[in-house]
Amino acid sequence: MTYKHVIGFGVAGNFAGHLEQAGEDKDFLAVEVKEAVQPKAIFPFYVPSEKAGFLSTYPLSSDTIIPPNDADNLQIEPEVALVCDIEYQDNKVVAIKPHGFAAYNDCSIRKPNAKKISEKKNWGVNTKGISSQVIDIDHLREGGKLDNFRIASFHKRGETVSRYGEDSPVVGYSYFHEKLLNWIVDRMNNQQDIGPTENIADFLENAGYPSQAVISIGATRYTEFGETTFLKSGDTSMVVVYDGTVYTPEDITAMAEKQSFAEQGISALVQSVA
């Protein structure tokens, strides 16, 4: 499945503790928030417009990661991505309506001198990941289908499979449900070009107001192994979004060790590092 016609955004700082582990919390000191748990910003990772420079390169893959030439500190970032419809009125976003979700790898370079978040997020083709298994949902309100799901991630090197991120409930996101969607709509219309953040309304305009978006809603915290282990050529990255009422964390670990995941109630993203 390809999303070349959609616009791609991510949410920064929507899982308590992740930015600190990634060494990115200092990047956001100038960003004003209304409450301590509020995400810091949304950022573009793909904009279907020739005006978007490096962000016009389509970066998503469901099976491969191609590391940048100059990075030895590439990490898996396990997330849920929402596949959404965007509704506009007078060139302003009035609603975001998710209709599907999938496992997502917001694979990032730890680039200390990057001026904008997006500079760490798209360095070419096959640099991020979204599972080809998209699970349908009808809404993101409390009590909905996605509330039952959890996010797990694993790293394989040689024959050794290790847990990379903490196995986390999707409802553990700081902002979720309508609160998250309303905040994203506000950021799309009002986020400014300040510090590491960018003016999102400009990207929407340049892309001709696309009707759909893929929005990754934040990376989980790392295990100690994940925090200190970076991707190398030959590794395998696995991000698994699974129904926690059907499978246990132990079930998912056993599937990861075999690199074979059940098809029902699971969106799995398995990528080989080139």
Image (cartoon, grey):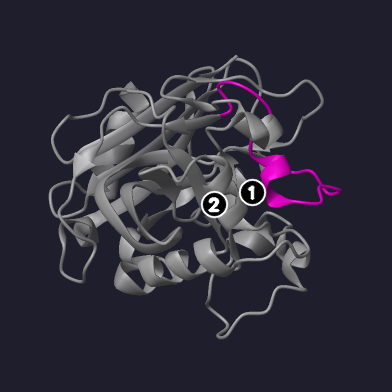
User: Which residue lies most toward the right here?
Assistant: 113
Query: What span is in magenta?
Result: 110-127
**Image position of 25 (left or right of 46):** right
Q: 146 or 221: which is nearer to us?
A: 146
Name the residue type under label 1: Glu
Give percent across and percent down for residue 37.
Answer: 53, 78
Work out whether 93 lies above or below 47: below
Is 122 covered by the magenta stretch?
yes
Q: Where is residue 47 in the image (x, y as percent from the top left)?
A: 55, 37
Q: Classify 10 Å Cα crowding around label 2: few (below 14), some (14-19), many (20 and above).
A: some
Q: Which amino acid does label 2 sit on?
A: Thr
Q: Which mark is residue 92?
A: none
Residue at 34 percent of width and 39 percent of height: 240
User: Which is nearer the eye, 67 or 17?
Assistant: 67
Q: Quadrant of the N terminus?
A: top left
Mark 1 in CB contact with mark 2 (< 8 angstroms): yes
Is 78 inside the magenta-drawn segment?
A: no
Taking 94 as reference, is 260 left or right?
left
Q: Name the residue under label 1.
A: 227
Q: Main secondary structure of the magenta part?
A: loop
Residue 44, above or below 29: above
At x 52% / y 51%, what residue is drawn?
10
Looking at the image, which is closer to me, 37 or 192? 192
Looking at the figure, which quarter contains the C terminus?
Answer: top right
Q: Which residue is drawn at 58% across and 82% down?
A: 36
Q: How far apart are marks 1 and 2 (CA)?
A: 6 Å
Residue visible at 42% across and 62% down?
Answer: 90
Q: Name the residue under label 2.
A: 223
Q: Number of labelled discs? A: 2
Q: Give above or below for 258 relative to 203.
A: above
